[in-house]
Structure formats: structure tokens, C-alpha cells
Amino acid sequence: MGTRLKKDDEVVVISGRDKGTRGRVLKVLVETDKVIVEGVGRVKKHQAPNQANPQGGIIEKELPIHASKVMLLDTKTDKPTRIRAGKDADGKKVRVTVKSGTVLGS
């Protein structure tokens, strides 16, 4: 299915227990259509000692959430917006915000 979100995009959660939370996309899981957002879906995991973490203990990590539960933040209006495909002056495909028409990324 794919997603129009990319790593380092600023998003806001629109449903679920973390509704209203803003964060940055840390990772996009294209095959499952999920994203990992900084500070969203945090859980505590009991980690047994291993070579990478010899102490073990309780660690906090972010779980992936479905991409449909987040909306991209429009940098111009600072509000959530949908995005659509568009073309820039050179004819390259770009992402454009629906509400303000701002071109995202380069």
C-alpha cells in the first residue's frame, strides 16, 4: 500500500491513546504500513541481560503505529494536513500540503 510519510517528518497523532501528541517520524515500516513516532506508543519492556545491554533491566521503547493514525504537520499553518503529489518547477515529483499548498522537502 505504501505511505506518503518520510523519516524526520513532523506529525500529529489523530486517534488512539496518544491522540494530540506531536512527534517526529523515526522510522517508516513500508511493508506493514506503520510508522515509529518519537514519544508515541511508549512501553516498558523487561530486558534480559545480553551482550549489547549487560545490565539488563526495564527499558522504554516506542512501538509502531499505523500510518493512518497520524497526519503531517503543515509548517506554514502549524496544523495537521493531508498531502498530495505535485510537481515543482523542474518537473520533479514533490509532496504538497493540501491546506496551504506548501511544498515539503526537497
Image (cartoon, grey):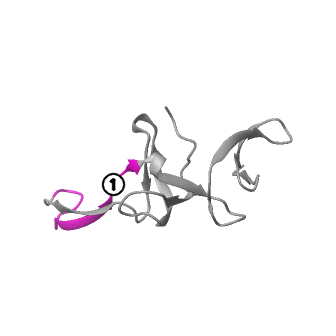
Q: Can you name the residue that lies furthest to the top here?
A: 1
Quadrant location of residue 80?
bottom right
Towards the viewer: 83 or 8: 83
Residue at the disc numbered 1: 63
Magenta segment includes 62: yes
Farthest-out residue, right: 89
Identify the image quadrant of residue 33. top left
| Residue that appears at 38% across and 58% down | 16
Q: Regarding mark 1 in the picture, which secondary structure is present there? A: loop
Between 34 and 77, the one lying in front of the other is: 77
Amino acid type, mark 1 = Leu
Q: Above or below — where is 32 with respect to 70?
A: above
Residue 37 point in image, percent of width and height = 44, 58
Q: What residue range appears in magenta? A: 50-65
Q: Quadrant of residue 90?
A: top right
Crowding at mark 1 (Cα within 10 Å: few <14, some 14-19, many 20+): some
Residue 85: percent from left, percent from top: 70, 39
**Horizontal and vertical percent position of residue 32:** 39, 37
Q: Which residue shows up at 62% across the image and 49% down it?
A: 82
Quick check: is 67 in the magenta stretch? no
Establish if 57 lies above or below 28.
below
- State the residue at coordinates (55%, 54%): 71
Taking the image as shown, residue 8 lies to the left or right of residue 55, namely right
